Image (tube, rainbow, N blue to C red):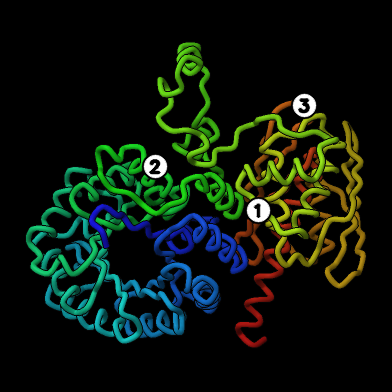
Amino acid sequence: MPDDKVLIFDTTLRDGEQAPGCSMTTPEKLRVAEALVELGVDIIEAGFPIASPGDFDAVRQVAQQFGSKTTICALARCRNDDIVRAGEALAGIERPRIHVFLATSAIHRQYKLKMAKEEIVRAAVEHVRLARQYCDNVEFSPEDAARTELDFLAEVVEAAIEAGATTVNIPDTVGYATPRQYFDAIRHLKTTVGNIDRAVISTHCHNDLGLAVANSLAAIEAGARQVECTINGLGERAGNASLEEVVMALKTRSDYYGVSTGINTPRLCGVSRLVSSTTGMVVQRNKAIVGQNAFAHEAGIHQHGMLQERTTYEIMRPEDVGFVGTNLVLGKHSGRHAFRTRLAELGYELADEPFQKVFEDFIVLADKKKHVYDADIVALVEQRGSAINERWTLKRFHISAGTNTIATATVELLHSDGRALCDAAIGDGPVDAVFKTLERLTGLEARLEEYQVRSISEGQDAQGEVLVDVVVNGATYHGKGVSTDIVEASAIAYLKALNKAANASQVVESLHGV
């Protein structure tokens, strides 16, 4: 690999999914994986196959579908069963990688593993060798490396490379490191590990102190040539290094870092929206690169400077990351050609059938709204794209609510087998009444944990986006709905979550032969 190329290892489907409430179904993982391939990531860590039959199935499907297009990685502890299961999940694909890990820090050795240093080294060597029996591309991670004694860290890394590891990842597992400390750790390995030239040094930084991206960049300065990161910085606790921030820092400051990535940066915002929509983790407005305010200029001085010369206050162009603002683009009289052209400009290339469905949605929306904005079009595409294996769809509803009135909802659903289902319920307001009716119709008992409403574009006729998290049988499911009617958007979001719960139950039953 050229020394000026940094590999992007995306772990959104594994570490990102571990964030509370961010679990994804297999169809959702496949959609995200497809977007990551189009984005140009070098390695996709698809999951942890030993964790559950569902995780194994998801890794297997991602590997089968995309294993010829990019490297697909499966995680395994330094345990024989883990590695065998990872090897089975990746079997037969062109570009597999097994990622094995074992903690090395003193605190982990004493309290979690209860193992001596010598035992750690022997276990690392044994399990790297086992992983090599399944594929030539093996990554080894000394977990909590940032809190491991440097001399011992170097010893473990050298032994792992000698055993066959082609990548050595240096995790800052709890986000404890500072940029200078992390730089020194990577530099120490570069200068003291005798066989370090036989492996790629990787970073995996958590964001507990808000330093994940800074630490990753410091490691690149020290010689690391792979960065493990996630879309929108998803991950356990405060998350991981944000892929879009790392990539754009390297691109924007190529004069300083002197390295590049293979990322197709105009797709960054689109992938960010997809992951946000899929997981229900809303991107904060002031998030770097992909936040709603990332390219907004409110201050008069900034606006004046922008009018004179864009680079006075912008170091990146919105189009470089595929940023979608609220540009007015279309109305009810716009035709198919104009609509398809705008979709292409926004980064969407749809086949005829899905295009026709989205176009029909656009016509309906244009009848409700005077103006349709870019953000509205993106919402229409994403709404259609998220309709995966829906057992029930909303056909129509009616509500009765007001002051000193008992809120009542009547809802009609269409079952996937063609049956029409109708029922009614009362509730504490129209939204609650709709939710209770949906539970009666689907036969699922759910608990609403999160309910968010926001405007997609501007104006009184703007579409509203509703995000919900519901708990069914102890598991959390996310749903999103979009409509100019906020009650309808709420119904769509809640029903999507219930559909996911029903599908998950069906998958569990099939995996266990019930």
The residue to which callout 3 is attached is: 460
Q: Earlier in the sequence, mark 2 or mark 3?
A: 2
Q: Which numbered tag is attached to residue 248?
A: 2
The quadrant in which residue 255 appears is top left
CA gap between label 3 and label 1 equals 30 Å
Going by the image, does 497 lie left or right of 426? left
Q: Earlier in the sequence, mark 3 or mark 1?
A: 1
Q: Earlier in the sequence, mark 2 or mark 1?
A: 2
Are the residues at dot 3 and dot 1 in contact (C-beta closer than 8 Å)? no
The quadrant in which residue 422 appears is bottom right
The quadrant in which residue 440 appears is bottom right
State the image coordinates of residue 511 (x, y, percent, origin top left). 61, 82
User: Is residue 380 visible to the viewer in this orientation of the structure?
Assistant: yes
> Could you say which is closer to the camera, residue 63 or residue 464?
63
Q: Which numbered tag is attached to residue 349?
A: 1
Residue drawn 50% across the image and 58% down it: 36
Element marked by disc 2: helix
